[in-house]
Image (tube, grey):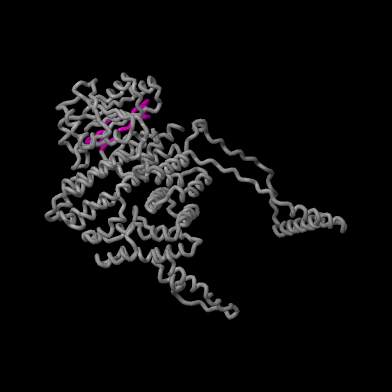
Amino acid sequence: MDSVLNTVQRFLYIGSDIPFVFDPPPPLDLELGKQVLGPAVNPVDPAGAGKQPEPPVTTEGPAHKKTGNKKKDNQTIKLEVEKAKQQQTKNNKPETPKAAAAAATESKSLTSKPVETVATAVLPLHPVLALIKSVRSRHFKSKSLRRTDECLFALAYCARNFATPEDRHAVYVLLPELIRTSHDLLTFISYFTQLATQSGHAGFGHGLRTAITRWYEKFTPIDLAEMLVRSISTAGWTHKDVIAKAHPKLNCVEKQALLDAAMKRTSQLQEKKAPEKKGKKKKQKETVAPPAPALPATKETAVAVSSSKAFRRYQTLLQFKSVPNAGKALELLKQHGAKGRLELLPRHLRRFAKVWEALYPYLTYRELLQAALPMHDFRLLKEGDANTKAYVETLKKRLDALEAECIHPIEVFVIAKLYQHGKRYVTKVKEEMHTLYLTDMCPPLKEVQDRLNVALEHSLSHHPKTGVRYYIALDLRCVYDRKKIFRNQVITCFQASVLLAFSIYKREKNVTVVAFTEDKEALASVEFEPSMTLEQAMKLCVGLMLPTTKVSLEAPIKQAEASKLKVDVFITVTDSLIRVNPTRRPPTAQLQEYRKKMKLNLSRYVAISLTHHTPSLDWTGPGKDTGGLLEMVGYSAHNAKVIEAFAKNNFF
């Protein structure tokens, strides 16, 4: 069972049953998820797997005699029943007044005793549900998942396929705790309905409807109003669809009014009119009293709901989504504030510099960095312009927000490179389609580029630490300075390798960086220094580049073992693992031997292929131990997050 749960844990983090990570992550494979979760959700008992079901034992009783006169038989049965009732009444009737008084006293004493409540034992969670809960709780604290689709699918699968009603009920009880955002709720319902449709039962049961009602109840009226307006369609589902299927009845009148408004029943809510039924009216009987007039409190309640703070917030946010021009948008921003309003405004308003200037102080730092690309497209960043000065000044003042949001250096580096090359997208196809509709663009400004580089250096020094000992081996061939990484036409293999190693070196204490040489068994040391900038680290690695190198996946393990160096995570970065390791054999034996000699049972190995997009190592076959090994393709902040989770032993 432990090996099955380890596979489930790996699936929750990387969405695969083998230790292979693909970036960008592909859509979730539902059939693969069923194969991984099936043995863990409903395990098969090996002891009773081969037993044949015993035939039912039938006992033959005496045959009843058939009587021809049914009427006589019925009368006989009635007489017997009446005699039994009379006898029971006679036995229950007290013979004397003393007996009656004693019986009354006894019954009174019995009823006066307090009833002792028996505490129901709390059943332990199913192992799979407990695992999902721990993974989600860890993600809420440190954002350890690159995406939440796998956990949400696992929840939906458990709710549909647990064997006992108690386990299924436990899933519904935990739903409001494990699902926090609107996107997660709609994604979960999408997976739930897909599984239900395949099983032939696509409706919402009582457990799911109750869980959805409790999920809406946990929000305050203001938060509920914000969520309903900001939420967009996810996997074909909206809140309007969920409300129509689940029919939640909230205890708070204000919250229920917001759900009615989301269903476009606002006018009916304010007027408090019941929908009229079409068709012929039935004549009422004269004996039936006329309906009571509506209480005046109902009208007062409707007025109070329509004038409440949450309802007014809901109507205000809807105005932002349908604002016609920049002048009206500036009035709304000035009147109601600009915090969190960027995603509500129509996209055509991003062409106006005044709108951006009003939003700068209230944007998150990630939104502030990403704003450089659309403003560059719309020629809003010009030299000496007021908007440019305001943007650069905001990037400078709000570096503390960069630390709070834990933005990885890879994200900042990609944005800086896109702005430097005057591009909008990293993929070739998207960029070609984008440039078809662009006119002449302004050249990149040095002051904006310098400020993006400062943000990059700041992120290198202030990213959260893992406290793990790393051993990183780089393949520094000369051709890598021209070779682009997979699905990224902006960053080269050389830049990706150096940035990945240097970002880990800057934030961790125990990091050893080496480079492969022309000798397969010899590794050259890369002498990074804590005071270096990324540009200086790049220049240092340029001096170590060779025309040809010989890469061995076992070489870093052997050198660390020879140096008696304790390592928790080995990382090897190259352009193609299949090129340097044509046998497709992972370094499993060498890693296990290193663990025994160094007495480190949790040492791990990560092999990164920057260009080859298919699995290069053989993970199939009997007796393959994949614990502690991981193969990755691509280069992005998602992969860096997976490496951090793997280094912390969140999955193995």
Q: Which quarter of the image is occupied by the C terminus?
A: top left
Residue 79 point in image, percent of width and height: 76, 58
Number of callouts: 0
Name the residue at 11% across, 54% down: 440
Left or right: where does residue 210 sit relative to residue 504? right
- Residue 51 position in % (x across, y down): 52, 32
Q: Position of residue 528 (x, y in %)?
A: 25, 30
Name the quadrant containing residue 103: bottom right
Does 612 sit above or below residue 374?
Answer: above
Determine if residue 179 is in view: yes
Q: Main secondary structure of the magenta part?
A: loop
Q: Is residue 354 left or right of residue 244?
A: left
Question: Picture coordinates of residue 393 (x, y %)?
Answer: 24, 52
Q: Residue at x 51, y 61 (%)?
A: 251
Residue 553's place in the image compared with 351, above or below, is above
Q: Which residues are magenta?
A: 608-634
Name the residue at 42% across, 65% down: 309
Query: Is residue 147 magenta-colored?
Result: no
Q: Residue furthest bottom?
A: 286
Q: Nearer the viewer, residue 105 or 75?
A: 105
**Location of residue 225 (image quadrant):** bottom left
Q: Residue furthest left?
A: 440
Residue at x 53% of width, y 75% of height = 295
Image quadrant in which you'd find residue 568 = top left
Residue 615 drawn in magenta: yes
Residue 277 at least partly seen: no
